[in-house]
Image (cartoon, helix red, strand yellow):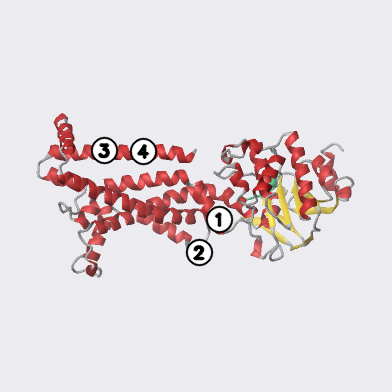
């Protein structure tokens, strides 16, 4: 699937500039970069939450995009009802609640969950749906180690089962290396480097990317 | 003061017919006008707070202006429109409860709209972003926003009801405070006081306070239940 080049600025200040991109189905892309490098803005424009400068569409018409915001939000409904928003499939909801270890909280009001619980609920809620392209903006930022592992497993499974393309925004190089087939590196609002995970996450071509990786002591 | 309380209790206990009529007209007017204002103000406020569309800024300014209109001025405009020389005289609404309700709706709806707009502007970001991410329709997103607003809807209704039951300028003007027909508690208090019947006025005032207290207590209990 194709994403068309776009730029997004806030009050005249460019936040992110992206060239034409081609994403492959069934592929997991890690999106990495420092704070403020434009990862969330990139995600939000593709998800249709923000319109890009010039307002031209960035995805092909009819493309189903699923998106998990960086701050997950629980609606004032029960956890189960939150999941049923995206699809009415109760069996699927039960399976996903089990997978994120929230079965025991199915009846609890979602706005009363803890931070990590909310993040897990939001992931399960998103995976209730069917999409061609899924964007997860730092899904594990507020999760403990065990939940992080569960989430990674579930994410991989979702890509394998549905054959969607998935963009995973992450701060964790380890996580990117564990999961990604390909990677995109953002630097100061520019998509500086993209390619196979083996290259971008281990032997990047660009000095800026190398420097970024060196922070992780690898 | 003591004798006024006594008199109030006596009036209620004796089931004074005129008092009961005043109470029922007051209830009819306040409940219907606050309910209609709620039905108009909630969706309008949510739209203004959560959506960006052409004309939104103008609507906000208009709403704020309407909020500042003194009740007597509102009453005056309605009086002129519906009086014997006004363009709407054929409707024969002057000095009826209906026109009192109408005037109240015009006074209260802007308050409710503004109340809901402020709240919606605060929560709309995450509510919409999350819904968009799930591919939910605009209608479903609106229903979610409505559901997130349960608490302010209750407090907004209370606000509207309190304004309606306490209002005197507009309702006396368009209603005429006609005994057995359009006399409400506030206008009756004015009448009694003008006639020098202070204790009856105080008695009515006390009933008004107790009613308002009861209504607020009942609704805040309900509100706590709904909000949890
Ligand atoms: N709504 C907004 N209004 C103004 N500026 C914004 C807005 N959203 C983002 N920005 C700016 O755009 C730039 C990119 O922000 P963005 O949130 O995309 O970064 P990020 O890579 O997701 O960072 P982080 O790792 O901290 O989540 C930042 O300089 C930020 O200040
Ligand atoms: Mg971000």
Q: What is the C-alpha distance between the residues marked 3 and 2?
A: 44 Å
Looking at the image, is mark 2 or mark 1 earlier in the sequence?
A: 2
User: Do marks 4 and 2 share a chain?
Assistant: yes
- A60 versus B114 height, above or below: below
| Local crowd size for mark 3, using a 10 Å CA cut-off: few (<14), some (14–19), many (≥20) | few
Q: Residue at point 48% right, 53% down?
A: B46
* 4 and 3 marks on the same chain: yes
Question: Mark 1 — residue?
Answer: B140
Question: CA separation, marks 2 and 1?
Answer: 22 Å
Q: CA distance from mark 4 to mark 1?
A: 31 Å
Disc 3 versus disc 1: distance between alpha carbons?
A: 41 Å
Q: Find residue B163 and report its horizontal and vertical position in percent.
A: 31, 47
Question: Which circle marks residue B54 in the picture?
Answer: 2
Q: Is B117 in front, or is B69? A: B117
Label 4, label 2: how many angstroms apart (C-alpha)? 40 Å
Task: Indicate the position of residue A39 as horizontal and vertical percent values.
Answer: 72, 50
Of the residues under marks 3 and 1, which one precedes in the sequence? 1
Tell me where residue A145 appears, x and y as whole percent: 75, 34
SS for callout 4: helix
Discs 4/2, front = 4
Please, what secondary structure does the residue beneath circle 1 have? helix
**N-term-proximal mark, 4 vs 3:** 3
Residue B218 is tagged as 4
- A77 to B49, vertically: above or below: above
| Residue at far top of view | B2
> Which chain letter goes with mark 4?
B
A205 sits to left or right of A89: right
Q: Position of residue B219 (x, y in %)?
A: 38, 40
Mark 4 residue CB less than 8 A from any atom of ligand 1: no
């Amino acid at each position: 699937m194709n994403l068309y080049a776009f730029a997004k600025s806030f009050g005249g200040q460019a936040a992110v500039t992206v060239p034409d991109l081609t994403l492959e189905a069934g592929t997991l892309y890690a999106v990495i970069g420092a704070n403020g490098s434009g990862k969330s803005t990139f995600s939000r424009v593709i998800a249709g939450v923000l319109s890009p400068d010039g307002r031209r569409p960035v995805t092909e018409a009819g493309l189903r995009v699923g998106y998990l915001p960086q701050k997950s939000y629980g609606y004032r409904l029960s956890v189960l009802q939150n999941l049923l928003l995206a699809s009415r499939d109760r069996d699927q909801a039960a399976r996903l609640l089990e997978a994120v270890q929230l079965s025991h909280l199915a009846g609890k009001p979602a706005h009363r969950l803890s931070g990590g619980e909310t993040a897990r609920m939001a992931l399960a809620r998103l995976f209730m749906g069917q999409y061609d392209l899924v964007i997860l903006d730092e899904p594990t930022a507020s999760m403990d180690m065990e939940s992080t592992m569960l989430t990674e497993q579930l994410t991989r499974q979702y890509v394998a089962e549905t054959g969607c393309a998935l963009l995973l925004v992450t701060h964790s190089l380890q996580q990117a290396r564990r999961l990604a087939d390909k990677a995109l590196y953002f630097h100061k609002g520019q998509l500086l480097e993209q390619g196979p995970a083996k290259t971008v996450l281990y032997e990047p071509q660009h000095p800026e990317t190398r420097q970024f990786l060196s922070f992780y002591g690898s | 003061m003591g004798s006024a309380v006594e008199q109030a209790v006596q009036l209620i206990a004796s089931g004074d017919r005129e008092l009961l009529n005043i109470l029922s007209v007051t209830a009819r007017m306040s409940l219907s006008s606050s309910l209609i204002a709620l039905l108009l103000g909630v969706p309008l406020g949510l739209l203004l707070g959560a959506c960006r569309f052409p004309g939104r800024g103008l609507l906000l300014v208009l709403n704020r202006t309407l909020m500042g209109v003194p009740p007597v001025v509102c009453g005056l405009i309605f009086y002129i429109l519906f009086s014997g020389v006004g363009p709407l005289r054929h409707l024969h609404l002057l000095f009826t409860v209906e026109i009192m309700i109408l005037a109240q709706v015009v006074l209260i709806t802007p308050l409710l709209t503004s109340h809901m707009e402020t709240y919606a502007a605060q929560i709309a970001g995450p509510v919409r972003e999350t819904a968009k991410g799930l591919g939910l329709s605009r209608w479903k997103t609106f229903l979610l926003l409505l559901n997130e607003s349960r608490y302010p809807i209750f407090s907004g209704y209370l606000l509207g009801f309190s304004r309606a039951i306490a209002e005197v300028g507009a309702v006396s003007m368009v209603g005429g405070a006609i005994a057995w027909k359009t006399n409400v508690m506030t206008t009756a208090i004015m009448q009694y006081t003008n006639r020098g019947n202070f204790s009856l006025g105080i008695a009515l005032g006390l009933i008004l306070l107790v009613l308002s207290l009861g209504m607020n207590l009942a609704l805040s209990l309900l509100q706590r239940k709904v909000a949890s």
